[in-house]
């Protein structure tokens, strides 16, 4: 398909139907002369925040796109193979072509199992996408109840996975290459460590994994952690679409943009969510940032269509939270720059706050679908000055 030359509509293709992409697609509905096509590889929305629940069998993770998308958003179930910026065409894996006036690059993030660690890609199970979680769930179903499970990664995903599995009766060891929940305050980290200890999760801190085998993990001090399955939650990567398309990225693969989220290489390409690196200073990968970034990318396009100057990125954080099974949580409140405050909620009182925040993500998307432009978010004030990039800092194709 090419751009529709018989109408005056501006054609926008949004690549990626996650938290950022759905918000961006819906927000573009503020103008009737903007036609929006959302390209996503799956026919249903995936709540990545709940993948650990799918693995443990304590919840579902997909939702119908129907109420999540505005009436003027067209969903195309396909994968983007390349963005042809010279011709302004998104080439799809099916062989179809979508012409565009603007593209919103919202491909999200993926698992990052390091190939440099022997056996990691062969034996470890990543947990960052629906297919990963389904494969891991099937593997756990093959094991006897209470079998030993090793979770690698002391971040929020690793902690939530370990907690969910211990609550479901598995024997869990959590291996942290550094500190447990390194972005949290000492008070919040203490609350997490206390809950994990009381529920018999063995936590190993400051000990990198050096190798993964079929039924064990080897650590830097030459110790061995036995386990019927190894779950890898340490770190995230980004799809290679931007690099394949000849667009500059940071070293992780996030699209480099200015503060309006416009690509440094092409003002018809904008980025949002985990795959965006504004001024080479990306925000924390999170759904908390994804929605505002999606809205910002859409507003930049709408400003250009209207002939006005786009606003610069202005987004602040409010906190971070981690579920501890179905009945407890820890909520770490933060300053707008995402540094931790002293205020922490823990235990049962924090669980409904965490669950409410998770449910609010879909509620916000549905609301934006019904009333484009309704999403509001905390502001963070001026961001640090843009970073000067050189060839050594940029992941050139």
Image: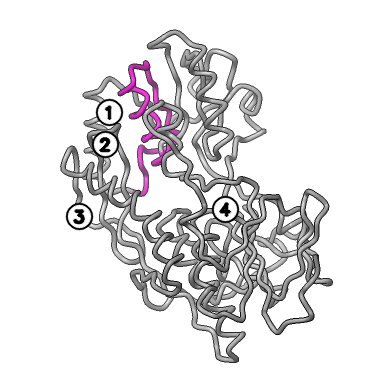
Residues at circles 1 and 2 in contact by the CB criterion of under 8 Å: yes
Q: Is residue 366 above or below residue 10?
A: above
Q: Which residues are magenta?
A: 155-183
Callout 1 secondary element: helix
Residue that label 4 marks: 108
Q: Earlier in the sequence, mark 1 or mark 3?
A: 1
The alpha-carbon separation of the residues under discs 1 and 2 comes to: 6 Å
Q: Residue 137 in the image: x percent, y percent?
A: 50, 24
Indicate which label's residue lies in the foreground, 4 or 2: 4
Q: Quadrant of residue 17?
A: bottom right
Q: Earlier in the sequence, mark 2 or mark 3?
A: 2
> Any mark on residue 196, and which?
1
Magenta residue check for 6: no
Mark 2, residues whose alpha carbon is within 10 Å: few (<14), some, or many (≥20)? many
> Any mark on residue 342, and which?
3
Indicate which label's residue lies in the foreground, 1 or 3: 1
Residues at circles 2 and 3 in contact by the CB criterion of under 8 Å: no
Residue that label 2 marks: 192
Magenta residue check for 179: yes
Residue at (56, 91) in percent of width and height: 308
Residues at circles 4 and 1 in contact by the CB criterion of under 8 Å: no
Q: Earlier in the sequence, mark 4 or mark 2?
A: 4
Q: Is residue 160 left or right of residue 153?
A: left
Instruction: Please count the marks in the image.
Output: 4
Callout 4 secondary element: loop
């Amino acid at each position: 398909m090419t751009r529709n030359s018989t109408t005056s509509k501006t054609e926008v293709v949004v690549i990626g139907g996650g938290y950022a992409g759905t918000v961006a697609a819906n927000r573009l509905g503020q103008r009737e002369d903007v036609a929006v096509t959302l390209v996503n590889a799956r026919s249903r929305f995936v709540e990545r925040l709940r993948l650990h629940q799918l693995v443990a069998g304590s919840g579902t993770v997909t939702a119908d796109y129907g109420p999540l998308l505005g009436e003027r958003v067209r969903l195309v179930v396909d994968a983007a193979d390349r963005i042809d910026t010279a011709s302004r065409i998104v080439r799809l894996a099916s062989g179809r072509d979508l012409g565009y006036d603007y593209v919103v690059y919202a491909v999200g993030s993926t698992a990052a199992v390091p190939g440099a660690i022997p056996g990691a890609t062969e034996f470890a199970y990543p947990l960052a996408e629906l297919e990963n979680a389904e494969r891991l769930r099937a593997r756990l179903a093959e094991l006897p109840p209470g079998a030993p499970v090793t979770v690698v990664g002391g971040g929020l995903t690793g902690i939530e996975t370990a907690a969910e599995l211990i609550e479901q009766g598995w024997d869990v060891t959590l291996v942290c290459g550094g500190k447990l929940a390194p972005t949290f305050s000492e008070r919040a980290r203490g609350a997490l460590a206390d809950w994990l200890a009381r529920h018999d999760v063995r936590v190993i801190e400051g000990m990198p994994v050096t190798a993964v085998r079929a039924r064990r993990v080897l650590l830097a001090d030459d110790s061995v952690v036995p386990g019927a399955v190894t779950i890898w939650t340490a770190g995230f990567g980004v799809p290679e679409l931007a690099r394949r398309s000849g667009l500059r990225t940071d070293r992780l693969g996030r699209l480099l943009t200015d503060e309006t989220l416009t690509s440094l290489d092409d003002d018809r390409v904008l980025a949002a969510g985990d795959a965006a690196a504004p001024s080479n200073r990306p925000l924390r990968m999170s759904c908390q940032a994804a929605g505002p970034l999606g809205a910002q990318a859409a507003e930049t396009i709408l400003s250009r269509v209207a002939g006005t100057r786009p606003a610069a990125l202005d987004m602040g954080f409010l906190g971070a939270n981690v579920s501890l099974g179905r009945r407890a949580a820890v909520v770490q409140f933060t300053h707008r720059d995402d540094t931790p405050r002293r205020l922490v909620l823990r235990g049962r009182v924090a669980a409904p706050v965490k669950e409410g925040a998770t449910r609010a993500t879909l509620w916000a998307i549905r609301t934006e679908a019904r009333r484009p432009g309704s999403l509001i978010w905390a502001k963070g004030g001026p961001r640090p000055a843009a970073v000067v990039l050189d060839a050594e800092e940029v992941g050139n194709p």
